[in-house]
Image: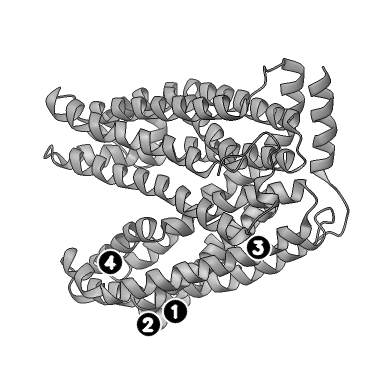
Amino acid sequence: MALTDTGGSFTQGNLFRHISVMSFTSSIGLMAIFAVDLIDILFIAMLGREELAAAAGYASTIMFFASAINIGLSIAAGALVAQAEGRKDRAAAREAASATAVFAVAVGLLVPLLALPFVNEILGLVGADGAMRDMAATYLWIILPSTFVSGLSMVAVAVLRAYGDARGAMYPALLGAGVNLVLDPILIFSLNMGLEGAAVATVFARIATMALALGYAISRYQAFAKPHFACVARDCGGAIKIAAPAMLATVATPVGAAIVTREMAKYGADAVAGMAVINRLVPVVFSVVLALSGAIGPIFGQNFGAGRLDRVQETFFDGLKFLALYVIAMSALLFVLRGQIADLFDATGQMRSLLYLYLGPLALASFFNGAIFIANASFNNLGHPGYSTWINWARNTLGIWPFAVAFGMIWGAPGVLLGQALGGVVFAGVATWLSLRVIEAPCKDPLLGHFSCPDQRMQVVMNRCSRS
């Protein structure tokens, strides 16, 4: 469903179909990445040295923060390009894409320059020491210099989604996963490179992903204009206003996971093991839910840019309908297979009880997390990205800790899971209410009451750049 030069594919046609196609294709790319990450760890574990897997874990913690920056920039690129495409202003779309891409490259080069000289100290902050710290540092010296490659590929993929090219946005992730899958055993085992081999394979996978994403974006849409310094400097302001809150919102997720893990640890290793299995199941089984924010964002953005607020509101409700159908179907499947899944992980005692609790009614709580993702997409694409930051941090702190502690005191480890789910219900309600207020009047801040239209100010800047 690639766009023609007339653009605006999401401003017409069946919105439920657009949401379905975008979500499923986005989730396929996500699932491929998750699967390869899992296989990566499996290959490293096959080397028979526990400290290697631990070193990879420490390095991944540091890499997450670099990824959070790139995710924020990709959200900004998608929002700005989709709004311009909805206005049928290809020049503005190209300027936005180019400015964000230049900024992603600049940040991607700056991060390793600032981090690598202090890599041992940074790893020490997350608990790495001795041989594990040295191995993790070597891993990061290979991976971190390619941060700009990852950033550029994420921006290009977001631009493809903003143009409505669901399949074009999916293939780069699949190619990267395939390259990683092929190179991992060759470099790790055949060439005896061990952990360094896994890092090199990831770098090549990033390059392949970037090459295909840029190739599609340029050949199909001429998506990037020749960057001019003055224009890029002006346009980056609009990108940063979206990217910074989106980046902060992304960082909130592991904070919530850490709170739940800490509370679970009070009830023994069995409880922590059960939580670990659940955390690994969720990204695979509910990958469509995780992909929803990035998938539905361009649909919001294009219709907002076209001034079709009726379709923006319809997108929100169709997104909730799609989410409900998917979560109910997957939850029913998990319930039917709960015995086999528990057996697969050799779960007994409390670990098995927790799995049965999640694979029964609590899997349905994924609907409320998905509702927060949809609301965040509306905030990021309708000119109020700061709300996504506040909602994510509130959900992952106030929406977890007091509920998990209180319910844990009553029901033990199962209570922690119940508390986490209930917190999601509360903040999904808040996010939904706030999102509908934003959709009703995008130029009016629903909490503070003042008027502002950042997208219109950005349009003036784009026009100046296009004429310069």
Residue type at mark 3: give it: Phe
Which numbered disc flags the more N-terminal residue, 2 or 3?
3
Locate residue 446 relative to residue 283 in the image: left or right.
Answer: right
Label at residue 23? none
Residue 198: quarter of image:
top left
Residue type at mark 4: give it: Gly
User: Residue, x 34% and y 25% (percent of image)?
Assistant: 204
- Circle 3 sits on which residue? 316
Give above or below for 388 relative to 102: below
> How is the model colour-coded?
one colour
CA distance separating discs 2 and 1: 6 Å
Label at residue 407? 1
- Circle 2 sits on which residue? 411
User: Residue, x 61% and y 29% (percent of image)?
Assistant: 221
Locate residue 390 relative to residue 323 in the image: left or right.
Answer: right
- Circle 4 sits on which residue? 274
